[in-house]
Image: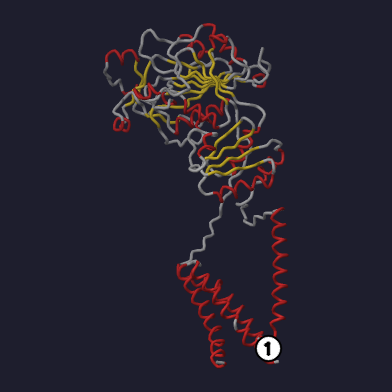
Amino acid sequence: MSNGKQTVSKILPILGIILVIAANIISAIHGSFTLATTIAIVVGLLLFLTIFLRFESANVRYYTNVGIYSLFGLGIAIFVYLLIGMYPQRWDITKQGLYSLSRQSKEFLKTLDKDVKVVAFVTERRPVEEFIKRYTYVNKKIKYEIYNPFKDTLVARKYDTSVMPGDIFVVCGKKKKKIRALKEKDFTNAIAEVAREEETVVYFLQGHGERSLEKSFQTLQERGDPSLSEIKRLLEERAISVKELKLAEKGFIPKDCSVLVCAGPSSDLFPFEVDILKEFLNNGGRAIFMLDPVSSPMTSFPNFTNLFKEFGVVIKRDIVVDMNPISQALYGDPLAPLVYGASDHPILKDLPKNKAFFVPQVRTVTKAESLPEGVSVEDILQTSDYSWAEDVDKIFRERKISQPPQDKIKPQTIAVAAVKKLGKNPSSATSEQGKRNEARLIVFGDSDMFANANISSASALVFLNGIRWLTEQKEIVAIPEKLIESTPVILSAAKTRIIFIMLVITLPSLVFFGGLGYTMLRRRAR
């Protein structure tokens, strides 16, 4: 019996070593530790430690004391770890500072004295949380909440009617802005935008048959949604308030009006409305006008024409015909021209030069041959090289298109931006407008391009950049891009396994078993 116990005590440690080695090799082949291999390693270590029962039975008390001291030391380490967790410190050792905020963001956050809440709707929590924590470490006034858009639908509806995975809302008081990209530049500027004191308010003129800001399901079923509800949503996502204004009823333009928009009127302004608009603009006001081509001889815009004359902008009773091969192949409609950016104006920022979009039925909007004093006008959008302008009444009366002489076929301007220099102290200027020494105006020859039925990413970008240019909203916090230097280390699958086995299996095993074996041999030699 005694010999049998001795045999077992010899076999168990060897069996333990074999089990540990086998489990590590299997894990190396699969590339990760599984539950089965982890259990095998633990059992193998326990079997190997039975060697103490054979050689170290006389020192059980000593090893018990060492175990207790080790547990006590482990408890101290856990306590220190938890203490450090209460006051975390972060170090970014990358050369480009990829995992820390830029100096510009930190300086801005140190001046932030308002509570800002970040609400993220994502399916993967960790990367978003790690990114937001860079901000919370600098300023404790920034709080965050992370939800799953598929599970927390009731919370999502509080922020938007259609929340998608990746949507992030930055909220300060009643202001709210939605972003999607986890970029420091966008995130910092979103915080700055919702936290700033002044508010941007866009008024949409009503009372002349302009486009509605709300969806109409009846017209949606008939011919597509003609409303501007998508434009309204995009503005509100950027912490911009949207209101309607019936100028004929109110009799004046509110003082908080940052930009006035007149989108697709079907009738002309009243003369007294023109006077109100002129006073607004001459006191530093900003406005966008979108005038669709109209086929009814009874509908004309002499008062709009009179208003634009002071800004060197000319609208004609025409419609653009475009015979470019692309639109003909896609739409087969010569009245749906292909539109490109016409200059390097800030309104066209981020719009690629070769990026084009279609516009259904548009009139020309051009610069006057002789501009009023202090006025500058710049082309914004133009059609393709295959286009020309025709009298709108002729087109709809004859129901046919005749190609004009070749010298008439050229790009047609359909949108312009005008700037009028004012005196340093314009009379009866409002408290906000009094800071401005120029009036700004954008005129589009169509409003369909911004309607829900036709809006595209390109036309939406043009409109939003137009609002930014009119309100002179520059990038609030200028943050330089972080350039990543490419220093790749390419390893084959075989080399990766060899490194894994050497560092994770072989080296720790040599240290453990070699040290333990050496200690036991020293004890036996005594």
Question: Does residue 202 appear in the picture of this structure?
Answer: yes
Residue 469, image x, y percentages: 56, 28
**Residue denoted by label 1:** 522
Residue 114, image x, y percentages: 69, 35
Give the quadrant of residue 402: top left
Q: Nearer the viewer, residue 299 or 239?
A: 239
Q: Nearer the viewer, residue 223 or 97?
A: 223
The amino acid pointed to by label 1 is Arg
**How busy is the neighbourhood of tag 1: few (under 14 within 10 Å), some, or many (20 plus)?**
few
Identified at 62% across, 87% down, the residue is 54
Tell me how many marks there are.
Answer: 1
In this image, 335 relative to 279: left or right? Answer: left
Residue 518, image x, y percentages: 64, 85
Identified at 55% across, 15% down, the residue is 372
Secondary structure of the residue carrying tag 1 is helix
Residue lying farthest to the top in this orientation: 271
Identified at 62% across, 16% down, the residue is 283
Identified at 71% across, 65% down, the residue is 75
The quarter in which the C terminus is drawn is bottom right
In this image, 369 relative to 177: left or right? Answer: left
